[in-house]
Amino acid sequence: MQLTDIAEQFEAMGVSVVAMTYDSIEILREVAEDEGIGFTLLRDEDMK
């Protein structure tokens, strides 16, 4: 099961869903649009 499949269930319980990655902002935008992601995507610039 993918996070996108269960994010709405978590949010209905009052849990904020976020995902963090080292990908560029451009890739994050593209993935969010292509996959219909409605939760927050964060970028770790320093890859820590």
Image (spheres, rainbow, N blue to C red):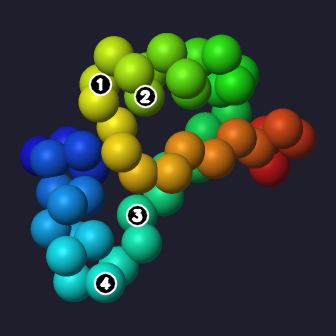
> Which residue is located at x 80 percent, y 49 percent?
48
Q: Which residue is mark 3?
A: 17
Q: Is residue 29 left or right of residue 48?
A: left
Residues at discs 3 and 4 in contact (Cβ within 8 Å): no
Q: Within 10 angstroms of label 2, few (less than 14), some, or many (20 or more) residues?
A: some
Q: Residue furthest right?
A: 46
Q: How many marks?
A: 4
> Which residue is located at x 35 percent, y 79 percent?
15
Image-quadrant location for residue 7 = bottom left
Asked if residue 11 is positioned above or below residue 18 in the image, the reply reads below
Give the CA separation, mark 3 to mark 4.
9 Å
Give the CA separation, mark 1 to mark 2.
5 Å
Q: Report the amino acid beneath label 3.
A: Val
Q: Is residue 23 left or right of residue 1?
A: right
Give the CA separation, mark 1 to mark 3.
15 Å
Q: Report the amino acid beneath label 4.
A: Gly
Q: Within 10 angstroms of label 4, few (less than 14), some, or many (20 or more) residues?
A: few
x%, y% of residue 24?
A: 71, 22
Of callouts 2 and 3, which one flags the residue occurring earlier in the amino acid sequence? 3
Q: Which residue is mark 2?
A: 32
Q: Which residue is mark 4?
A: 14
Q: Which residue is mark 1?
A: 35
Secondary structure found at label 3: loop
Secondary structure found at label 2: helix
x%, y% of residue 19?
A: 50, 51
Residues at discs 1 and 2 in contact (Cβ within 8 Å): yes
Give the CA separation, mark 2 to mark 3.
14 Å
